[in-house]
Amino acid sequence: IKIDAIHLREINMPLAYPFETSFGLTTGRRILLVELESEGLTAWGECVAGEHPYFSDEMIDTAWIITETELAPRLLDAEIEGGGSCPRIFKQVRGHRMAKAALENAVWDLEAQREAVPLAQLLGGTREKIACGVSIGIQPSLEQLLDTIAAELAAGYQRIKLKCKPGWDTTIFEAVRKRWPEILLSCDANSAYRMRDFDAIASWDQFKLLMIEQPLWYDDFYFHSMLQKRLDTAICLDESIRNRRDALAAIEMESCRIINIKNGRVGGFSEAIAVHNAAAERGIPVWCGGMLETGIGRAHNVALSSLPNFTLPGDVSASSRYWAEDIIEPAVIVSTKGEIVVPTTPGSGYPVQRDRIEALTVRRQTLRP
Ligand code: OSB
Ligand code: MG
């Protein structure tokens, strides 16, 4: 495959609803998009790095400079057979996985178009529909949280995940469980807790949570394994899992019983598939995480979620939960059963709206061989 040009651009998009986690509040996104031009075809990738290095050590500006100075030149210079070639091409660059994933996923998208197969099929997907949950941010009040949950359940979502932190945890879980004793309910702390909180976290077993996501440090395995020994509830790791080896270490140490896969966090579809397969072989269920993506990243998450070991509802939800108007058309929609139908047309199946992207662009750059 020959790449004729790589276009980088930053788009700015206000979120339809502000999103608060234990690490901060997001009201709008600054997003790096990459566009590949290749022999008459166009393919897109979205970098999920945030506006600040608060979720991980990457942010949009580091991703931009690494893409511009290191990754794009390597890709323009390389022998590319498909998306699977990218880990080799980017190997010399350490870290910067979200930057790598944006380019790698665009190459997979391109490969799917060239082969005229659905991206999901190219990745090894087997599901016709994927199960959807929602991640609900920290709210101004318990009342607003309960109203939001009621609306998401009415819309059909199959699992409710509550963002939590010290002070926004036990009492809200209690209130939610009192009103909805049976729903699939989980929480995500984004590393907000420490060892002094182990007793409090152990007390959450009474709420029968499906999982507790990333309660401790973002780079930890050992203390999560200590905590997991004290819990009936499964721990799910998100931030800690950077690659297949991390997944193996976490499973071996029993740091978690469930893994969240985000293709940006692990460096692209190749490594996401490797994590998926390693977990599947060891009986560890996975689900697809989200990073407040536009339709480009969201379409890629839909395709990834179609792999067989994505057995739990993911954080891949409708475009309308994030954007007044998405940059793909049609937007990602979720049925009243809480499912997204995996597209069966070639490529990602969600056509990109170039005019809309142009209007949102605040910065751009083109690289050629
Ligand atoms: O930890 O899963 C997370 C959003 C931004 C950064 C980290 C996370 C999240 C979410 C939202 O939980 C998932 C989504 O709805 O896209
Ligand atoms: Mg998470």
Image: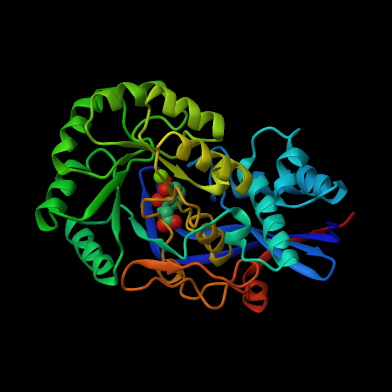
Instruction: Tell me which corner region of the image, top left, top right, bottom left or bottom right, holds residue 357.
Output: bottom right
Residue at horizontal 26%, vertical 45%?
Answer: 210
Q: Nearer the viewer, residue 163 or 87?
A: 87
Q: Is residue 368 above or below residue 204?
A: below
Q: Is residue 55 above or below residue 341?
A: above
Q: Nearer the viewer, residue 281 or 218?
A: 281
The color scheme shown is: rainbow
Would residue 179 appear left or right of 51 to someone viewing this image? left
Which x, y percent locates residue 203?
A: 15, 33
Which x, y percent locates residue 33?
A: 65, 60
Residue at horizontal 49%, vertical 32%?
Answer: 247
Q: Is residue 320 above or below residue 85?
A: below
Q: Nearer the viewer, residue 203 or 271?
A: 271
* In the image, farthest residue toward the right: 369
Image quadrant in which the C terminus is located:
bottom right
Which x, y percent locates residue 57?
A: 56, 37
* In the image, farthest residue toward the left: 178
Would residue 216 appear left or right of 369 to someone viewing this image? left
Image quadrant in which the N terminus is located:
bottom right
Q: Is residue 26 visible?
A: no
Residue at horizontal 71%, vertical 51%?
Answer: 83
Residue at horizontal 64%, vertical 48%?
Answer: 101
Would residue 358 appear left or right of 261 to someone viewing this image? right
Q: Is residue 64 visible?
A: yes
- Indicate the quadrant of ligand 2 in the picture: top left
